[in-house]
Amino acid sequence: MAFDIDMIKKVYQQMDERVKKAREAVGTPLTLSEKILYSHLWDGDPSKKLERGKDYVNFAPDRIACQDATAQMALLQFMQAGKEQVAVPTTVHCDHLIQAKQGAKKDLERANETSNEVFDFLESVSNKYGIGFWRPGAGIIHQVVLENYAFPGGMMIGTDSHTVNAGGLGMVAVGVGGADAVDVMAGMPWELKFPKLIGVKLTGNPQGWTAAKDVILKVAQILTVKGGTGCIVEYFGEGAKNLSCTGKGTICNMGAEIGATTSTFGYDDSMERFLRATDRNDIADEANKIREHLTGDQEVYDNPEKYFDQVIEIDLSTLRPHLNGPFTPDLATPVGELGEKAKKNDWPIKVDWGLIGSCTNSSYEDLTRAASIAQQAVDKKLKPKSDFGINPGSEQIRFTAERDGLLKVFEDLGATIFTNACGPCIGQWDRSDRKGDEKNTIVHSFNRNFSKRADGNPNTHAFVGSPEMVAAIAISGRLDFDPMNDTLINEDGEEVKLEAPKGIELPPLGFDVEENGYVKPEEDGSHVQVKVAEDSNRLQLLEPFDPWDGENLIGAKLLIKAHGKCTTDHISMAGPWLKYRGHLDNISDNCLIGAVNAFNKQTNFVKSQITGEYDAVPKTQRQYKAEGIPTVVVGDHNYGEGSSREHAAMEPRHLGVRVVLVKSFARIHETNLKKQGMLGITFQNEDDYDLIQEDDTFNFIDLKDFAEDKPLTIEVVHADGTKDTIKANHTYNETQIGWYKEGSALNMIKKMNK
Ligand code: SF4
């Protein structure tokens, strides 16, 4: 299972030389983020200064991590790449497809029945291609990565937005789409716009009820959900050293909620302690040898305004505990002020559930801090007024917490211990107490609290806090409870007060586990058969997309002209469709069903130019495909914003859409379209969007000459026979035109491997 110490030694050797070279190239002292980025350039040569927020750069990540929902399509694509093994150490973690309902044992049994074929598929592909596989119940991807694979100064990508959690151990770790991960698995570079840098200076020491979580809840308030876009957030200062490694992980984890590319902390004693406690003395020894490269230069931290694009300062000694929500993680309120705010906004004061867990807050330390509150409730005869649910972060944490009596404390309080998995954090929660859309309040230690996120109910008001604050609020059963000032009445009618939590950073007896759930792949997996049943409705082997015939595209019909916002959720909805993430044909039945038709302002209701009738988008498009008629999707600004899921590009491609013509693209989606062999182009004159009519036919009359920096010419033929000739821009470079010619980036990789 273990990390590859030789690989890490190599990274550190290169770092020594590359950091010095990068410092010369940039001409200033370096932040930690820059040191890691410049040390991981694909060409290994940091002798050119890269412009933040401008230059697109090829990187060579050290690791890849995938979770079960996203790994399906990523691995189905990788299987087409014609490689025998993954080029970069990779792991797959089964954590999303396990529903929380009756408790760990029964829930896991049920998941193993309902998603058996998906787990079997992921295990067999992993075995075949040299990928480490973590079984269902082994833990949540980001906790398992932190405990086993993250290392200071490393670079990782993962097919999950909270991959950023590994910044707690000094990595630059970034969430990406499956197609990006496939490139790196296949030995190709990973492209990223060189990020801008936000510095967060932490001073002081958190007191009493204030936790690491409160740092990011405060940062979210300052930066809002968009404030970190295109940036790495780097934390530094004396206060940072006063936080545990897993606490740092919590802060980095929720960097995803402010849109940051990632977040990171410099290597310090807390990271060394964590590495040694998780049986990685050799990494700690190696890291100690190059300590100065694993943190930013002192001059940078002494004068942060000179070196960061933005600087925030937070004094941990005066930081108050917060609860953020409802419905957005940046709506921060100090505990104690929430009652009044709730009354004003008509948020239910009664709290139904307190949930502790998720990749954000399920470490050993988190459980001890929450358990110290739970123990007080038991000792002081307080019966919790809310239901309690706990998801430990990994089997190693669960086993150790059980051994150390922590789980018993929660059980004594009536808590349900769910599987070591995502559970309610991703809506995998069969909530027994409320059905339908009743208005109610829950508190949790997770990261996201969007409408419907936990239980599918748009009227569940979810508030995010630290595990210990969640425990206290759940015991009181009230959103307006302030454990620092308020008292509670116990079963004997006495007034009692909860003391501030006490945490244990790392288990005094060490971590322990009997069966951690890891499956090591075979050295030579060439004989391994990948398991996909032909009649499966969850999984489908991919067929390569057809290459371009080299001809102009003539007679393409308009499928839909999307009006306004068209995110990846509008193009490929999540929720109930999550289960089809491994079956391209089945999931294609959600293709563009959320996009608003510009001609009737309805969703999933477009005119077929074959029948003249209005019908669902996927059904209409399947008719075009059956008749061999190519189609075009037209869109507005920032088309494809949101998640990096490649399904939003693969589905239209699979159904026969040939071109996506928009005012502007979200960058990742534009790349995804290119990778899947689609023509993703933009109106040269934005107003031409208004020329497009419902019965239009498109002729791409100079596609034959498709070349870098050369706009394309399109004849738009209207139903009355009139014609407009418009120009479209594109950003395809030579390689990407190669992908288009071959039918997809994967086809190209496959060809190169022959
Ligand atoms: Fe994503 Fe929640 Fe699972 Fe973390 S615990 S990986 S946020 S679903």
Image: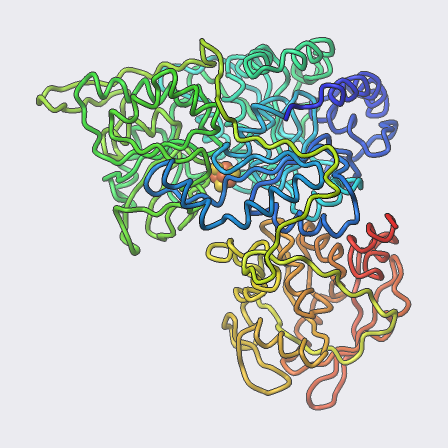
Q: Which residue, as the protein is rendered here, is positioned at the far bottom? A: 720
Which of 421 and 311 lies nearest the eye of the viewer? 421
Q: Is residue 274 left or right of residue 544?
A: left
Residue in the picture at 62% in, 60% down: 584
Q: Quadrant of the N terminus?
A: top right
State the residue at coordinates (60%, 41%).
Answer: 123
Give the x, y percent position of residue 522.
69, 34
> From the viewer's perspective, is 82 left or right of 502?
right
467 or 422, nearer to the observer: 422
> How far across and down, in percent of the image, does residue 275 sit?
59, 15
View extreme (left): residue: 493
Instruction: Say which quarter of the image contains residue 677.
Output: bottom right
203 is higher (above) or lower (below) than 593 = above
Number of callouts: 0
Camera sees residue 553: yes
Rendering coords of residue 7 (x, y %): 76, 23
Q: Is residue 407 left or right of residue 205?
A: left
Q: Residue furthest front?
A: 527
Q: Is residue 486 above or below residue 549?
A: above
For the point 67% across and 78% down, the residue is 626
Could one spot residue 564 in this view of the protein? Answer: no
